[in-house]
């Protein structure tokens, strides 16, 4: 369990470093904000093809194997930047190619580690809900700390040399998973002939499983839509607002409050799940999200904005570990990798599209109008989600997906 969370934390930190260093490197090479935006947009595209394949690989070849190989490949892809720069010199084309390769490799470790949570929970004698909360809070903390480390590395050793650090972190993540000694329940089911992971049917099993489980399907769609409404506030609206005030410090404080609230909220999920049903946690989380977003949309003074941001992050924090737990409780072990990959693909597609549309709308109508519109949309989605009958059955048994049932 400790090895899994070490890998989770250092991988999240490494990705956080890369997230800051690569756009900075592009700006150094080109001086073009449009080129940095192109890098961010294009690097998400491989996920549409790669992530579904990764889910099938996790179920077919094993969770530990995919995680170890993926993190090692991520380390190689990051080391390639300084090596190419040393051998032939970096330009924007090389950065774009290497970033696409890295983006294709990274989701494998993320998906496989999610699938390993249930095995680590059993081996460590820790409640599944508790470990899910710890897992998501540590990953969120890594994403929050990583950019700070990346900024310090850029200032001290430069953008290219800074990439040696995440490469080392990815190697640590790979070694940690390789040292785990746990039962791989998904792989064992495949070896026993209880799962079909070959051909088109095996590849699309994750979609079939989600389609057959109304509660899990509804929760996945709701979180995807809510993330698409929530994330543009961090990446578009708040930066534009504070840039107009010439207050980068204010932006950092508010983003820090959001991230800190998310870490605490995710960590608290284990405590909440021991005292409340999953459905009641969803209600509390979504009501808290609505309470937090209303004052933020009005763009008040910094103290109130920071407090509302903390409430928003705190309320939203339990949702991801809750979704993990729902998959682990309701989906057969040999299909969890493919279900996680379907969810990850949806989260790769919808939020970036929402960010693009938010940027266009903000350019045309301004931050105040767009923020209020997004807040209203988020409140509507939260209210509909809570009222849906399918969500109320999230604590009940799942329906079996179509097709032959796994043999004992």
Image (cartoon, rainbow, N blue to C red):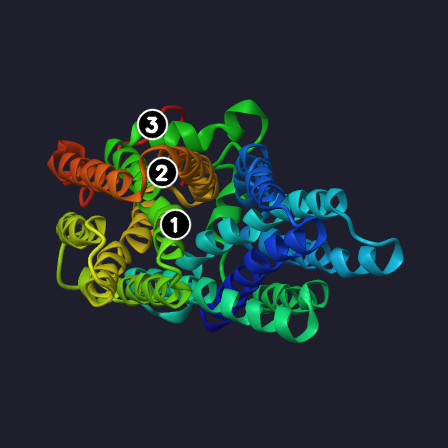
Residue 129 position, x and y percent, is: 29, 60
Residue placed furthest toward the front: 245
Instruction: Write down the residue under mark 1.
Output: 240
Q: Which quarter of the picture shows residue 50?
A: top right
Mark 1 element type: helix
Residue 399 position, x and y percent, is: 26, 32
Residue 192 position, x and y percent, is: 52, 42
For the question of whether residue 265 can be seen, the reply is yes
Q: Is 34 displayed left or right of 350 in the figure?
A: right
Residue 362 got which mark? 2
Q: CA distance from mark 2 to mark 3?
A: 35 Å
Residue placed furthest toward the right: 87
Residue at 37 percent across and 37 percent down: it is 358
Q: Earlier in the sequence, mark 2 or mark 1?
A: 1
Residue 211 got which mark? 3
Assess whether mark 1 and mark 2 are in contact (beta carbons under 8 angstroms): yes
Mark 2 element type: helix
Residue 291 position, x and y percent, is: 14, 53
Return the residue nearer the eye: 405 or 39: 39
Q: Is 104 displayed left or right of 286 in the figure?
A: right
């Amino acid at each position: 369990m400790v090895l899994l969370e070490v890998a989770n934390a250092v991988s999240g930190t490494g990705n956080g470093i890369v997230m800051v260093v690569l756009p900075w490197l592009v700006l150094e090479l080109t001086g073009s904000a449009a080129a940095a935006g192109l890098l961010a947009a294009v690097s998400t595209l491989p996920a549409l093809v790669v992530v579904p394949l990764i889910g099938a690989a996790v179920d077919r070849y094993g969770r530990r194997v995919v995680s170890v190989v993926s993190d090692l490949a991520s380390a190689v892809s990051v080391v390639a930047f300084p090596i190419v720069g040393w051998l032939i010199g970096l330009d924007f084309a090389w950065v774009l190619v290497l970033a696409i390769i890295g983006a294709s490799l990274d989701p494998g470790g993320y998906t496989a580690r999610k699938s390993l949570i249930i095995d680590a929970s059993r081996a460590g004698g820790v409640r599944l809900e508790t470990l899910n909360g710890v897992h998501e809070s540590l990953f969120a903390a890594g994403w929050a700390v990583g950019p700070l480390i990346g900024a310090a590395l850029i200032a001290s050793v430069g953008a290219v040399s800074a990439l040696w650090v995440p490469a080392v972190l990815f190697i640590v993540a790979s070694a940690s998973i390789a040292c785990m000694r746990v039962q791989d329940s998904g792989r064992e089911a495949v070896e026993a002939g209880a799962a079909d992971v070959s051909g088109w049917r095996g590849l699309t099993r994750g979609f079939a499983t989600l389609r057959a489980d109304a509660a899990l399907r509804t929760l996945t769609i709701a979180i995807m839509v809510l993330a698409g409404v929530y994330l543009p506030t961090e990446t578009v609206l708040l930066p534009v607002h504070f840039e107009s005030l010439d207050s980068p410090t204010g932006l950092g404080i508010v983003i820090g409050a959001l991230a800190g609230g998310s870490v605490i909220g995710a960590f608290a999920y284990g405590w909440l799940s021991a005292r409340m049903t999953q459905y009641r946690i969803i209600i509390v989380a979504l009501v808290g999200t609505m309470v937090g977003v209303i004052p933020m949309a009005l763009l008040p003074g910094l103290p109130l904005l920071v407090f509302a941001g903390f409430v928003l992050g705190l309320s939203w924090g339990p949702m991801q570990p809750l979704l993990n737990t729902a998959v682990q409780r309701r989906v057969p072990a040999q299909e969890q990798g493919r279900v996680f990959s379907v969810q990850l693909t949806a989260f790769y597609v919808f939020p970036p599209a929402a960010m693009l549309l938010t940027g266009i709308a903000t350019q045309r109508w301004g931050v105040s109008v767009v923020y209020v519109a997004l807040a209203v949309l988020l409140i509507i989605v939260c209210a509909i989600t809570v009222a849906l009958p399918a969500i109320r059955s999230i604590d009940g048994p799942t329906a079996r997906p179509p097709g032959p049932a796994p043999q004992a």
